[in-house]
Amino acid sequence: MTLAPLKMESPAASERIAWAAGSRERYPDGSLRGIVLTEEVRALLPCGEFVPAWTHASPRSKYAPSLSFYPSGAVKAARFEKPEELMAPNGDVVTAEKVSFFESGRIKRIFFTDGRLSAFWSERDEAGLLRETTLTLPWGRMTLLAGAAAYHENGLPRSVTLWPTERVNLRAGGRDYPVRQGFSLDSEGNLASLEPAFPVKVETPLGELEAYDPDALGVVADVNSLKFDPRGSVVSLKTMAIIKRSGASPLVIRPFAGPHPLDDRKKVFHPLEVSFRQKIIRVVETGRGKTEGRVFSLDDSLEVVPFTGRALVQISLPDAEGL
């Protein structure tokens, strides 16, 4: 059944469409949080008039809200029944399967594909439906395979999440970087972070370090392991290195060796996270759920030693040829 367009910009308006829902979820105060539609409804969303998802028979279909709302009743996200063309905040025309919004109604994130991976629908199946997307970025237009693009509320791009097999090259601080998984930008349009496609040597206040995160998930590219300031200088990275402090209080910090998820006889090494702020260096051992690290000064006697764990090469870095 097709209904007249409905504006969902208040709690009362949200309730008017809720009767077509197969299920609904509410906030603790009783306001509508999300609905799964089971009938066809045309909805006037902040980005245009579309039909939210209402059939769920496909093996890639997610049983997730067709529409979700902020407590105020403003639309938070919408999943489409079929891929739809819409206009991104910066004027790009793209094809999307889902879109999320800031409470103001401005587009927050556009999902170019939104299928559910399972034993019945693989990543390869999903890739067969993927389309190349052309995006306008501060340095020009790029055509690439991407899963999603996010935007700042001022309309400038915030991040691009690449398809797992996609690789691009980006420039920061006068040098080029090979990129996998994605990259992010600050609200002024400067490159803020990226995920290196393989270990790359970068200049830091500690000297040359090799930047790479074998644990990177790549689900959302808003924050990545190699981070820059607006001038393109490295301010944080993940690295497979050993950091030593000599002097009266000697200390050695090395990549954490954790259990292999599939073989108890093997270990997987997790990188150090090293960040720089003025003359302060912060080192965090990742892989054990730590949120605090050790803080040093550039005046401390610190030395960087290459890490050569054999298990790292065999297990964690299959793409790092020649290490």
Image (tube, rainbow, N blue to C red):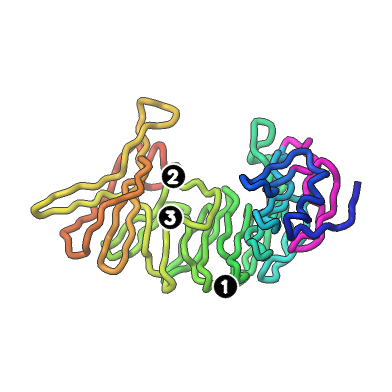
Q: Residue at x 42, y 74 (%)?
A: 231
Determine the secondary structure under disc 2.
loop
Residue indicated by mark 1: 138
The stretch drawn in magenta includes residue 57: yes
Horizontal relation, residue 182 to residue 116: left or right: left
Image coords of residue 294 (percent x, y): 26, 52
Magenta segment: 36-59
Q: Is residue 27 visible?
A: yes
Predominant SS of the magenta segment: loop
Q: Amino acid at mark 3?
A: Ser
Judging depth in this view, the residue of 102 and 243 nearest the camera is 102
Horizontal relation, residue 79 to residue 269: left or right: right
Q: Residues within 10 Å of mark 1 (few under 14, many from 20)?
A: few
Q: Residue at x 90, y 50 (%)?
A: 2
- Of callouts 3 and 2, the N-terminal one: 2
Q: CA distance from mark 3 to mark 1?
A: 21 Å
Answer with the quarter of the image where residue 206 lies: bottom left
Judging depth in this view, the residue of 31 and 151 nearest the camera is 31
- Of callouts 1 and 2, the N-terminal one: 1
- View extreme (left): residue: 248
Q: Amino acid at mark 1?
A: Pro
Determine the secondary structure under disc 3.
loop
Residue indicated by mark 3: 225
Answer with the quarter of the image where residue 121 lies: top right
Residue indicated by mark 2: 215
Q: Residues within 10 Å of mark 3 (few under 14, many from 20)?
A: many
The stretch drawn in magenta includes residue 121: no
Q: Residue at x 44, y 28 (%)?
A: 262
Q: CA distance from mark 1 to mark 2?
A: 29 Å
Q: Residue at x 66, y 59 (%)?
A: 101
